[in-house]
Image (cartoon, helix red, strand yellow):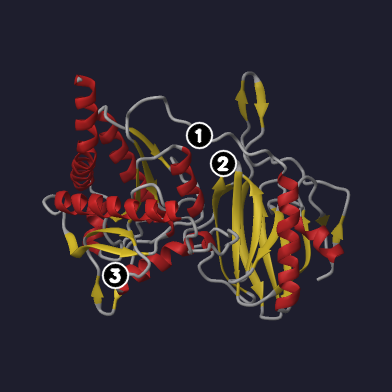
Amino acid sequence: MSMALCCVLVVLSGTIVHAQEEPETGSVLPPDSAGVAGEVDGLLVPPAPRVVGARVAGDEVRTRFVLDLSGDIGIAISALADPYRLILDLPEVAFQLPQGAGREGRGLVSAWRYGLFAPGKSRMVLDLSEPVRVDKTFVLPAVDDQPARMVIDLVKSNRSDFLSFAETSRAQLAQGKGAPKGDKLTTEDSDLPVIVLDPGHGGLDTGAQGVAGTLEKAVVLDFASILKRKLEETGRYSVHLTREDDTFVQLAKRVDKAHDLGADLFVSIHADSVTRGRTLARGATVYTLSDQASDDLASELAQSEKMSDIIAGVELHDEPEEVTDILIDLARRETRNFSVFFARKLVDEMKSAVKLIKNPHRSAGFRVLKAHDIPSVLVELGYLSNDQDEKLLVSESWRERMAGAMVAAIEGFFRPRFARQENEAGQ
C-alpha cells in the first residue's frame, strides 16, 4: 500500500467523503433528523450520533463492511497485526445493533465487535482472516427512509503491505492526538490504606458470557461496586475502581492507575467461562502471580486475560521480564509474599461463605498482577460457563455474602498496620 493512499485512508474525521456510486468530495451528511435534540442552559444540543446497522458482504478476495449511521460522524481507520485487525475509531456513539451482531463474519472479516473504548470515544474492531488493503471508503447519504451508510471496501493483500499500513496508520493517529497527558492521580493526605478494585473487561471487551446470557463485564462491575461500598462503610480505607462504567481500560493502564494512586492492595475481579474436558469448572478461585501456571486451568485463564487488549484493538508491546535492578527484584519477591499472604486470608474467609473450586489458591502469569510493589490478587467470583454459578453471580444475597467475606479478609490483611498505627498514636 502506498504512503499516499495510507494518508487518505487513515483519518476521516471532520468532513466525510460522500458518494452516490463513486466517492464524491465536498459535501457533508444532512443533519440528523431522526433523533431528538436536547436542551442545556437554554441551548439546543443535537442528538448523539447513532450506529443503527452494520453488516459484511463479499468473499475472500473482496469484502465490504457497511455501517448505517444516523448522521455525520468522523471515523479514523488504522490497523494492527498479530493477529490481523482493522480498527475503526469513532466519536462516542450509541450502538443500536441487534444482540449477537458481529459474532459471525464473512470473507476477509472473520468477526467484529464494538463498544465504548474511552470517554468520548467508541471503537469497532474487525478481526481479519488474512492481510487486507483498504481499497476505498465512501458514504452514501440518507435517502427517504434509508440511513446514511459508511462503506469500507477491503481487498486481499500481503503481510508486508499490511504491516507497512499498520505502522503508518498508527503513527498518524498518534500524531493526531497531540493532547498532553494529565497529571497523575493523587489521593487525599491520610493514613488510610488505598485499595484499588479492578472490574475486568468493559466496553467492547464483554468478557465471558453465561449460559443464560449474563455478561462478565456487567457482573464484575456490579460486584466491585458492592465491595467498594462495604469497604467504605468501615471508614478504614480509601477505595477506587479502575473503571466505574462500561468503558474499556487497557490492562497496563489498570496497573498504572494503582501505581498513580499509591495503592496498598490491588484486587482484580473476574467471572470467566472455561471448560476443562467434560468437567465444568465451578466455584470461586483466588489467583496470585507466578512465572509458571499452577495448573492447566490457571494457564487457560491467564491466556484469556491477555486477550482483552487484543479484543479491544490495542497495540501489543513485548515487555521484558528480566530484572536488572536488585532492589526491584527484592521488592517483587516481598510483594509476592504479601500477595500470597492475602490470598490465603481470602480463601479462609470465603470458604465459610461461598462455594470454592478444588484447590482454590492458584497462580499464573496474569498481566494485571505484575506490579512489583503492590500486593495483588485476581479473584474469580465463579464461572459463567456453569449455570449454577451464573445464578449465584446475579443473586443479591450471594454477592452481599461474598463481599462480606472479602471485607473480612482485607481487614485481616491490614490488621497489623492498624495495630501499629494505634500503638504509635498511644505513645
- Give above or below for 307 relative to 392: below
Q: Residues within 10 Å of mark 2 (few under 14, many from 20)?
A: few
Question: In this view, which residue lies farthest toward the front?
Answer: 326
- Residue situated in front as seen by the camera: 141 or 292: 292
User: In the rendered view, would you say 105 is above or below 361?
Assistant: below
| Nearest to the observer: residue 294 or residue 72 | 294
In percent of width and height, residue 127 lies at 59, 69
Q: Residue at x 41, y 56 (%)?
A: 329
- x, y percentage for residue 173? 72, 52
Binning the other alpha carbons within 10 Å of mark 1 as few (below 14), some (14 to 19) or many (20 upward) gives: few
Q: Which residue is mark 3?
A: 294
From the image, which quarter does the N terminus lie in?
bottom right
* Cβ–Cβ under 8 Å for marks 1 and 3: no
Q: Residue at position x 29%, y 70% from top?
A: 294
The answer to which image quadrant residue 45 occupies is top right
How packed mark 3 is, by other alpha carbons closer than 10 Å (few <14, some 14-19, many 20 or more), is: some
- Left or right: residue 126 compared with residue 213: right
Q: Amino acid at mark 3?
A: Ser
Report the amino acid beneath label 2.
Pro
Label 1 vs 2, first from the N-terminus: 2
In x, y percent, where is residue 324?
50, 59
- In the picture of the structure, the residue carrying the numbered disc 2 is 119
Q: CA distance from mark 3 to mark 2?
A: 37 Å
Q: Relative to the observer, which residue lies in front, 234 or 413?
A: 413
Circle on res. 185: 1
Numbered-mark total: 3
Report the Cα–Cα distance between label 1 and label 2: 17 Å
Q: Secondary structure at mark 1?
A: loop
